[in-house]
Image: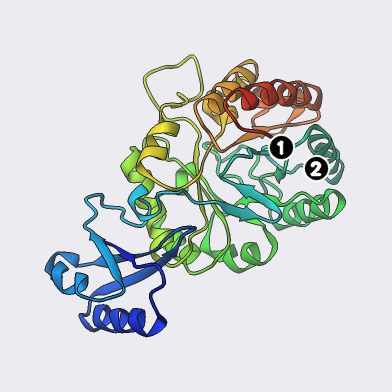
Amino acid sequence: MIIVLREGASSRETDGLMDFLTGLGGLSVHPVPGEEQTLWGVTGDTGRVDVSRIESFSCVERVLCATAPYPLASRASRPEGTRVQIGSVTVGGPRLAVIAGPCSVESREQILRTAQAVRRSGAAILRGGVLKPRSSPYAFQGMGLEGLALLKEAHEATGLPIVTELLSVRDFDRFIEEVDCVQVGARNMQNYELLRLLGKTDKPVLLKRGLSATLEEWLMSAEYILAGGNPNVILCERGIRTFETCTRNTLDLSAVPAVHHLSHLPVMVDPSHGTGRRWMVSPLARAAVAVGADGLIIEVHPDPEHALSDGAQSVDPAQFDELMRGLRAIAAAVGREL
């Protein structure tokens, strides 16, 4: 249920409405301040609530009975769209945010060299995996918290905010303190214990779509975070598993306009994981911008042929620089900028 408050409603009026709603029991109220209107998302057993009783409050303009199972993530709860701040970078709105960096932090030299290169080319945020969920138990699993320290050093050297994946609730406090944006990877999209914890913070969360997740399942995972009180959720399409074997995954670019229609949350695209093919990253990055993505995540490595993970889908700094130059023209054509 979405309650649209009347412009200029006094705190006394809204406090009365809040007391009424919480007094019913079993309901949670989530204020969603907007640029033009203030909305309240009400979750819980709303089917037993007398809507006419809510509409009788002087502070209420109208009540919308949301049909989507994700009322807080739905476009109805925030028609103008959400913008999420990662450090000094805004995700959502007219300016596109590009996240770039290696799949894994491998050494001090590697991450510093990559961070400086992507910054020169116009990347706004630095990525780097320190805890890696790998299909094979024998594959490189990341440097762990030592890698996090190196990622922080790269941040201090370049000023780029950092995003990295959190795998376990065990490392939750450390990541919340030291990372600018926490990534929830595809394999953890339905780790509800982790999602609930992230909902209790205001830390930006980059939520990747699961390998076989529908759009509704993806948005329901976002709802867990929003329902906990954290509005700073960014969605990331990173390819889904289909019958096709030519590419690592099938990058679902139709998800971008579809999710923008269904939800107010910003949507980024990861063409690196989406294809697993270096030569496909640039054309699909351009296509993602053309269909309305709010940003991109690109894997960049100074020596992809010798990368410890995902070298086949990583571009080198020169290729990334060329990619960024091409993206500026596409962004301008659709009324956006890098």
Q: Quadrant of the C terminus?
A: top right
In this rendering, the answer to whether 140 lies above or below 131 is above
> Which residue appears at 42% of the width and 40% of the height?
210
List x then y, in percent, for residue 193.
42, 62
Q: Left or right: 328 with respect to 51?
A: right
| Kind of residue indicated by mark 2 | Ile
Q: Quadrant of the N terminus?
A: bottom left
The residue that disc 2 covers is 111
| Kind of residue indicated by mark 1 | Pro
In this rendering, the answer to whether 63 lies above or below 116 is below
> Which residue appears at 23% of the width and 75% of the height?
26
Q: Left or right: 97 with respect to 258?
A: right
User: Relative to the observer, which residue lies in front, 102 or 33?
Assistant: 33
* Label pair 1/2, CB-CB below 8 angstroms: yes
Q: Which mark is residue 315?
A: none
The residue that disc 1 covers is 102
Q: Left or right: 214 with respect to 105?
A: left
Number of numbered callouts drawn: 2
User: Relative to the observer, which residue lies in front, 210 or 171?
Assistant: 210
Secondary structure type for disc 2 = helix
Q: Left or right: 331 with respect to 293?
A: right
Q: Distance between the residues labelled 1 and 2?
A: 7 Å
List x then y, in percent, for residue 115.
80, 41
List x then y, in percent, for residue 198.
50, 63
User: Relative to the observer, which residue lies in front, 243 or 177?
Assistant: 177
List x then y, in percent, for residue 219.
37, 47
Secondary structure type for disc 1 = loop
Residue 139 visible in image:
yes
The type of colouring in the image is rainbow
